[in-house]
Structures are given as C-alpha cells and as structure tokens.
C-alpha cells in the first residue's frame, strides 16, 4: 500500500478510507495497535499471514503478541466508504479529528495528523533517505 491521505474522524468515530486503499484492504480488514503509537490496518489476507506467523512462534513469544490481538478490531466499510474506529484504538493513537492515513507496504497506518507531519518532516530529508537506502543495501 502506498500514499498519504488526510481525512477527519467524525463525531461517531468513523473514518473515510481512501478509495485506493479500500481496493487493497477489501471489504473486511483489521485495525490494531502499532509500536509507533499509531494504528496499523491489515487486509484480511495480510492479517491471516500475520496470524500464521504468530501461530508458528513458541507460546512464550505468542504471549508477547497478545495486545495486538486483544485490541484488534475487525472492520467493514459502510456505504460511504467509512469505518468505525473503536474508542480504545482512537485513544491509544491519540486520534481526535484530523488524521493521516499512510500506505506502508503490506499495511496502512492511521496517525494523528500533527504527529505524522512532525515525523515525516524529520524522515523526509535527503540524508535520512540516503542513510536508509545504504542500510538496506540499495
């Protein structure tokens, strides 16, 4: 998934999912916690792959993944392309009104817009991009 999209969460906690991401996410998708204090959004297929990896882990490692499953929400779109983000997930990621929906390879991320703007400003520098490309041996 790719792209950056700015949208608002309405008073009922619903977020419009951009058409390009809706096509990739499908009719049913999963939203859960992220280690970056934002939310991660997975298509049903990506969620199944993620779950399969966790199932292959030892029980001790699986327990460490517990919060990602406990807080996950199975989501669907309404007729207007919106999905309800449960309150506990909005609170975790400090989402109030303005958000950025970011494509991030095999998933999307939902960020508070101000936090995303600050982070992307620090990440989108020629030096940082060169450093990442070097680290990944591109």
Image (tube, helix red, strand yellow):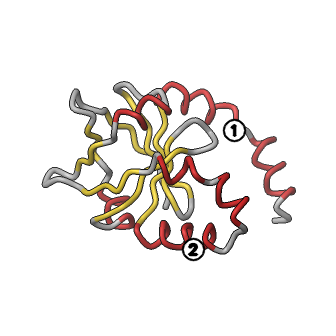
Q: Which residue is mark 1?
A: 123
Number of callouts? 2
Of labels 2 and 1, earlier in sequence is 2
Q: Image quadrant for the C terminus? A: bottom right
Residue 44 vs 122, above or below: the answer is: below
- Relative to 123, 52 lies left or right: left
Mark 2 closeness class: few <14, some 14–19, many ≥20 residues within 10 Å: few
Q: Nearer the viewer, residue 91 or 109?
A: 91
Disc nearest the viewer among 2 and 1: 2
- Label 1 element class: helix
Q: Residues within 10 Å of mark 1 (few under 14, many from 20)?
A: few
Residue that appears at 49% across and 32% down: 92
Residue 52's disc is: 2
* Residue furthest front in the image: 59
- Image coordinates for residue 91, horizontal then vertical, percent: 44, 28
Q: Residue at x 48, y 53 (%)?
A: 108
Judge whether 20 appears above or below 126 on screen: below
């Amino acid at each position: 998934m790719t792209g950056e999209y700015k949208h608002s969460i309405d008073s009922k906690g619903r977020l419009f999912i951009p058409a390009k991401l809706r096509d990739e996410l499908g009719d049913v998708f999963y939203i859960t916690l992220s280690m970056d204090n934002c939310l991660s959004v997975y298509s049903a297929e990506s969620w199944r792959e993620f779950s399969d990896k966790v199932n292959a882990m030892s029980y001790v490692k699986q327990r460490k993944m517990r919060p990602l499953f406990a807080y996950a929400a199975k989501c669907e779109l309404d007729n207007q392309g919106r999905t309800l983000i449960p309150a506990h997930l909005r609170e975790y990621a400090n989402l109030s009104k303005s958000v950025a929906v970011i494509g991030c390879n095999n998933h999307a991320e939902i960020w508070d817009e101000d936090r995303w703007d600050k982070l992307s400003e620090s990440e989108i520098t020629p030096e940082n991009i060169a450093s990442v490309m070097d680290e990944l041996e591109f």
